[in-house]
Image: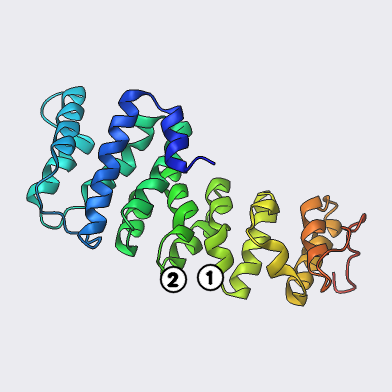
């Protein structure tokens, strides 16, 4: 079975593989230094060459990521150079591989909370999604929950789907997790995206009540009840494996 890196190497062209080698080298070096956010050490020749190449492509004077990379050497409070690589992953390795590349960078750097927060706060939706998808592979405990909570407040289905992954399954409190399941139903994110849904839903009477109320509201409004709601409701049975009901839950008298 191929590792994520081997799968990428099989897909990327030589230029992209060379860029990825340099990017992962910078991330590994940062991890060796302890993952500190201060970057004042000299860059590797590979990093310097990448900066010169990007500057040449952008034209002089340097701009964008190339300028940021140049300033990182002189500014003791600048972000680590691998974080600049994180943002550039789609440009160098293609959008189809960007999530995998960004995840590798986060893991290789053993990204601390400061880095993942910075990358999330400053990132595009795609860059934020990659952070969320990788949180469970990092040693962050529950400290990154604010990022998940932020994503669940959006209506961006890409972020919502990424936010209910393994990290949320491990760390979201029951009340917040139940609302995350409802958020998926509201935004039409398939409940299949919810990691460990069957395990956490089993025997959860409060989740069953919330789902039943939501179904009743939909029915009262003349709107269809999503099949995913029936699936999630069925999983709340203590037995954990009943067949999904074929009809929508009946409205309560209060509805």
Query: 148 left or right of 143?
Result: right
> Which label number is shown at residue 141?
2
Which residue shows up at 82% across the image and 55% down it? 221
Q: Secondary structure at mark 2?
A: loop
Q: CA distance from mark 2 to mark 1?
A: 8 Å
Q: Quadrant of the N terminus?
A: top right
Residue 115 picture quarter: bottom left
Query: 238 left or right of 107?
Result: right
Where 105 sits versus 144, above or below?
Answer: above
Farthest left residue in view: 74
For marks 2 and 1, the one nearer the N-term is 2
Where 213 sits versus 188, above or below?
Answer: below
Where 193 sits versus 181, above or below?
Answer: above
Query: 230 left or right of 146?
Result: right
Marks 2 & 1, CB-CB < 8 Å contact: yes
Farthest front residue in view: 1
The structure's colour scheme is rainbow
Residue 167 screen position, x and y as percent: 52, 62
Residue 132 screen position, x and y as percent: 47, 54
Residue 180 visible from this viewpoint? yes
| Local crowd size for mark 1, using a 10 Å CA cut-off: few (<14), some (14–19), many (≥20) | some
Q: Quadrant of the C terminus?
A: bottom right
Residue bearing the label numbered 1: 171
């Amino acid at each position: 079975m191929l590792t994520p890196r081997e799968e990428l190497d099989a897909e990327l062209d030589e230029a992209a593989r060379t860029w990825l080698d340099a990017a992962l080298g910078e991330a590994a070096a940062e991890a060796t230094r302890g993952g500190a956010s201060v970057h004042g050490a000299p860059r590797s020749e590979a990093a310097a060459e990448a900066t010169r190449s990007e500057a040449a492509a952008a034209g002089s004077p340097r701009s964008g990521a190339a300028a940021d990379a140049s300033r990182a050497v002189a500014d003791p409070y600048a972000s680590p150079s691998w974080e600049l690589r994180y943002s550039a992953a789609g440009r160098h390795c293609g959008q189809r591989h960007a999530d995998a590349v960004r995840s590798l960078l986060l893991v290789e750097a053993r990204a601390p909370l400061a880095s993942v927060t910075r990358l999330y706060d400053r990132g595009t939706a795609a860059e934020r999604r990659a952070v969320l998808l990788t949180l469970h592979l990092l040693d962050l405990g529950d400290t990154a929950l604010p990022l998940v909570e932020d994503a669940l407040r959006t209506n961006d289905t890409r972020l919502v789907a990424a936010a209910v992954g393994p990290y949320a399954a491990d760390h979201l409190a029951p009340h917040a997790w139940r609302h995350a399941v409802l958020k998926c139903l509201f935004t039409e994110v398939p409940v299949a995206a919810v990691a460990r849904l069957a395990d956490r839903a089993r025997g959860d009477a409060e989740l069953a009540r919330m789902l039943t109320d939501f179904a009743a509201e939909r029915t009262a409004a003349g709107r269809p009840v999503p099949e995913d709601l029936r699936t999630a409701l069925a999983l709340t049975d203590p037995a954990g494996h009943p067949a999904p009901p074929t009809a929508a839950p009946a409205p309560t008298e209060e509805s």
